[in-house]
Amino acid sequence: MKSRKRLLISFFEILASVLADASVLCNTSTSRDLITIRSRAEHEGPSFYTITLPQFSKCFERSLENGSWLPELFTGFSRSRSSCLPRFLSGFTSLVFNHTGELRDDSSIEAVEAIRQICLVLNKIKMDCTKERQRSAELAFSACEAEISKFRIKDWELLEHFRDSSSYFLGTSLARVSVSLSEGRVCRSKHGPGTTVDGTTGNRKYLHRQWSRRLQRSFPVDSNWFVNSNELLDDLGEEHSIGTDFISCRDEDPVRVCFVPKTLKSPRVIAIEPVYNQYIQQGLMRELVANIESPFRRTGGQINFSDQSINGSLAVSSSISREFATIDLKEASDRVHASLVHKMLQPYPHLMRGVFDCRSKYAKLPSGRVIGLKKFASQGSALCFPFEAMVFYSISIAAYMKAYGLPVRHHRVRAFAKRLYVYGDDLVVPTKEVEIVIRGLESAGLAVNRGKTFQNSHFRESCGSDAFKGHLVTPVYIRNTLPERRTDSGSILSTIATANLFYQKGWWKTAAFLRMKTERICGVVPHVLSTSPVKGWYSFRGTYCIDRYNSDLHRFEVRGLVPAIKKKVDPLDGYRALAKFFTERTKDPFSIDSFAKSVQRGSGYTKSRWASPG
């Protein structure tokens, strides 16, 4: 971890280069802003860059949405004598709002982009939060659970409409998976990439010999874990009993709640699942996603799990036409009550039983306290993402049906459903119906993030695409601290990628600064094309470096850095290696590394190699 002084210097240098580019972009002076940043950072520390400045950007976006400046939001920033705008970044804000605070008709797109880039460049840097903020996150997790436990689905005003909408629009997909389970077809399960409750990683997941009795009801171990009957016979003990340890419901491991870096304001809460639950969840997730995303289903193109460009392109076009509004949800996965999923799956008993048999019922907090879960699942469960999207989609349609008193098969309901797009907790809905959808979501105990929901202005934000008047104003985020030595492989690769993003965006001074910082550590980095496996600098002119001609491969080559992953010896052979072959589908399944080795956590590094420059 860098010292506080070095971290502040690094952050200030980054902001200085970003301000220099923004000054050129908008033809305004930033010398006074630079003095303010230096002064406040000395008193407030890194939190000024990672918390205060992002908050300024959020307040600025709310002012855009409101159509006029909201001075009450900008506490901590002194106002100009001749204007209601703050002195800080006034050269940019004055290009968007006039001195009375009204949104200008000729508001500058470049100024909007500059303000957001300045304020958000360090918003998502990967650093651990303070212990106090982690404790606050744990309390917030418990408070969220207590709040959603008050939800009573029997008293929910949208219950019947929710049943109808989920059955009509999702019924074919859910029924298909349910029939597959009822016929005893083997679920194409696989192990997840992360760790598990008991710390099992790598190939040891394939050697795991625990299975819950709940899982056994829907996913018999003989057909869902063992590769074939020969392995099952080998697993039989002297007393002809399966060597697998069956765990009773009361002895099941609770999910382990932990924190991973998100922003310095608050961490991301992840719930780590047991091996056996995670394994089955991955298989169910595959089946559900494939069916729901199918173009032959009513939800094809409306609920998306792998393609977020649909929501992103709608955000850009709607920043001009304002035809669609973008909705964001707070604590989305932690607020989906299990009873909502239960009611959705009620017409499909085999699927309902299978889903809830692999759902964890308890969670162990970092403090050691174990609590019961009313939510369906937290992030970490493979079923969290698909089911939250299905629930949000069904609630939105149910709210529309209730508001207009229409049956689910009415042509207006079907037309609305075709104009509703869901990707996780990002919703794109027709602007005319946005308040109806918001009320419907809130009636189910969900929390709409009003600060990131846009309907009135020419600003839209969805799935990583931020747009203003048809132009992308998405900032480039610096994810890692700047490298200080050659062993900082993650920082080196991240800085190269970030410098290229700034270069392609036309922010030359920031790109040059990051290039200088990188080459000071690892030497000269070559120019390459974006298609090259070697990491290097990009050029609009399409130029690239050549270091030699390879007569064996008949091509020009350049020597540069490539990412690599260390693998540790992790013995796996026999039937368990065969199971890995069928589930992992590795690029080189016949390589010994695919079976006898596994990836070490956090083991990425860089190495030099010869490769084609394009």
Image (cartoon, rainbow, N blue to C red):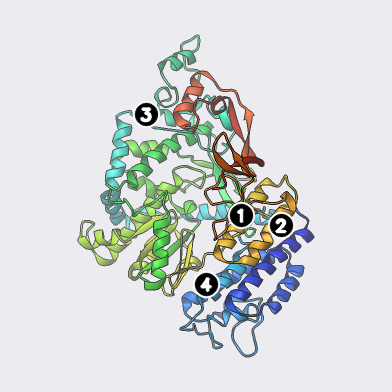
- Judging by the rendered image, the residue that carries numbered circle 4 is 61
- Judging by the rendered image, the residue that carries numbered circle 2 is 517
Q: Secondary structure at mark 3?
A: loop
Location of residue 397 by image quarter: bottom left
Q: Are marks 2 and 4 in contact (CB under 8 Å)?
A: no
CA–CA distance between discs 2 and 4?
32 Å
State which tag comes first along the sequence, 2 or 4.
Answer: 4
Point out the frontmost of discs 2 and 1: 1
Residue 543, x across and y down, in percent: 57, 55
CA–CA distance between discs 2 and 1?
13 Å
CA–CA distance between discs 1 and 3?
48 Å
Q: What is the three-letter code of the residue carrying label 3?
A: Val
Residue 201, x across and y down, in percent: 59, 33
Q: Residue at x 75, y 49 (%)?
A: 485
Q: Residue at x 56, y 36 (%)?
A: 196
Q: What is the three-letter code of the residue carrying label 4?
A: Glu
- Judging by the rendered image, the residue that carries numbered circle 3 is 186
- Left or right: 575 in relation to 597: left
Q: What is the three-letter code of the residue carrying label 2?
A: Lys
Point out the frontmost of discs 1 and 4: 1
Evaluate whether residue 1 shows in this view: no
Q: Residue at x 38, y 65 (%)?
A: 439
Q: What is the three-letter code of the residue carrying label 1?
A: Trp
State which tag comes first along the sequence, 2 or 1.
Answer: 2
State which tag comes first along the sequence, 1 or 3.
Answer: 3
State which tag comes first along the sequence, 3 or 4.
Answer: 4
- Judging by the rendered image, the residue that carries numbered circle 1 is 537
